[in-house]
Image: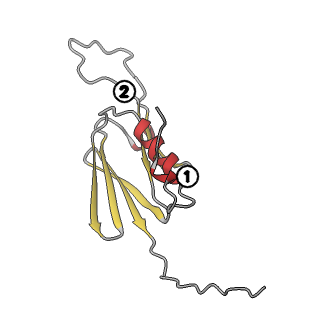
Amino acid sequence: MTKISFASHPFLLGFEQLDRLVERTAKTGNEGYPPYNIEQSSDNIYRITLAVAGFREDDLSITLENAQLVIRGRQVDDDEGRVFLHRGIAARQFQRSFVLAEGVEVGGASMENGLLHVDLQRSVPDAVVQTINIEKK
């Protein structure tokens, strides 16, 4: 069976990278930890909120890697001298990735009540109309 993608349509020229992006995003694991929200507060402002209860700011890292926002969490397991009768809260690692569109920039990050907020803003370029001259041969 031949794989057909939208980038192979004859009217969509130069969209191969977008096609690869869609493919990569579809292959991303669907693990549900940590849970997150994505909010849009205006046409160009977004906020990603992750529930990171038990994590300190030092346990979290936020990086931008090839237009991909990557949020990692790694807790230090300091069980020395502690005896648990029940352990339902485990020190757990995570990695969440979000693919950002061209022009979307990270505005900042903050922690509040066990929630990590990452603010994003899309810079909207001015509309440009370009006239192409036809060469005479």
Q: Which residue was labeled with disc 2?
A: 92
Q: Quadrant of residue 72?
A: top left
Q: Position of residue 8 (x, y in %)?
A: 51, 51
- Neighbours of disc 1 within 10 Å: few (<14), some (14-19), many (20+): few
Q: Secondary structure at mark 2?
A: loop
Given the image, on which type of amino acid does mark 1 rest? Answer: Gln
Mark 1–mark 2 Cα distance, whole angstroms, equals 34 Å
Residue 17: which disc? 1
Residue 22 left/right relative to 32: right
**Disc 1 vs disc 2: Cβ atoms closer than 8 Å?**
no
Q: Is residue 122 above or below residue 75?
A: below
Q: Residue placed farthest to the front in the image?
A: 137
Front-lying residue, 134 or 122: 134
Q: Quadrant of residue 131?
A: bottom right
Q: Position of residue 36 (x, y in %)?
A: 28, 44
- Residue placed at 35% from the left, 37% from the top? 55
Q: Position of residue 75 (x, y in %)?
A: 41, 30
| Residue 67 visible from this viewpoint | no
Residue 91 left/right relative to 64: left
Given the image, on which type of amino acid does mark 2 rest? Answer: Arg
Q: Secondary structure at mark 1?
A: helix
- The answer to which of marks 1 and 2 sits earlier in the sequence is 1
Residue 8: which disc? none
- Neighbours of disc 2 within 10 Å: few (<14), some (14-19), many (20+): some
| Residue 23 visible from this viewpoint | yes
- Residue placed at 43% from the left, 27% from the top? 76
- Residue placed at 55% from the left, 52% from the top? 17
Q: Position of residue 132 (x, y in %)?
A: 63, 84
